[in-house]
Amino acid sequence: MVEVLTASEREQAAEQATAELDGALRAVGVTLPSLCVDPVSAASTFMAPLVELGRCNVETARRLAEVLAEYAKGAAYGHDVRDGHGPEGRRR
């Protein structure tokens, strides 16, 4: 049986996911100033709430691209970059 979440539970889950994403991004030096739960989708009974990543300046976009590229490089080497160690095994 599929569990059906209430509108309040869906919005709470979206807010939690948004907070987790914000924390993870900030931990690597990226701040998305417009990061939030989309209020229109959060009020919908037909779809799951959407997380609005919003707009950012060029510097933030480049930093996000840099972090993702670094992660991808570490993943390509077969290292679990989530443990804080890069491909060379040094602490970031």
Image (tube, rainbow, N blue to C red):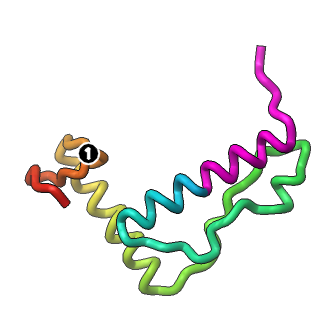
* Residue drawn 37% across the image and 71% down it: 29
Membership of 50 in magenta stretch: no
Asked where in the image residue 65 lies, by quadrant, the reply is bottom left
Instruction: Please give left or right for residue 59 compared with residue 3 in the image.
Output: left
* Residue drawn 45% across the image and 80% down it: 60
As displayed, is residue 33 above or below residue 44? Answer: below
Q: Amino acid at mark 1?
A: Asp
Label 1 Cα crowd, 10 Å radius (few <14 / some 14-19 / many 20+)? few
* Residue drawn 77% across the image and 42% down it: 10
Predominant secondary structure in magenta?
A: helix
Split into 4 quadrants, where in the image is the N terminus?
A: top right
Q: Nearer the viewer, residue 33 or 1?
A: 33
Membership of 7 in magenta stretch: yes
What residue is pinned by disc 1?
A: 83
Horizontal and vertical percent position of residue 69: 31, 63
| Residue most extreme to the top | 1
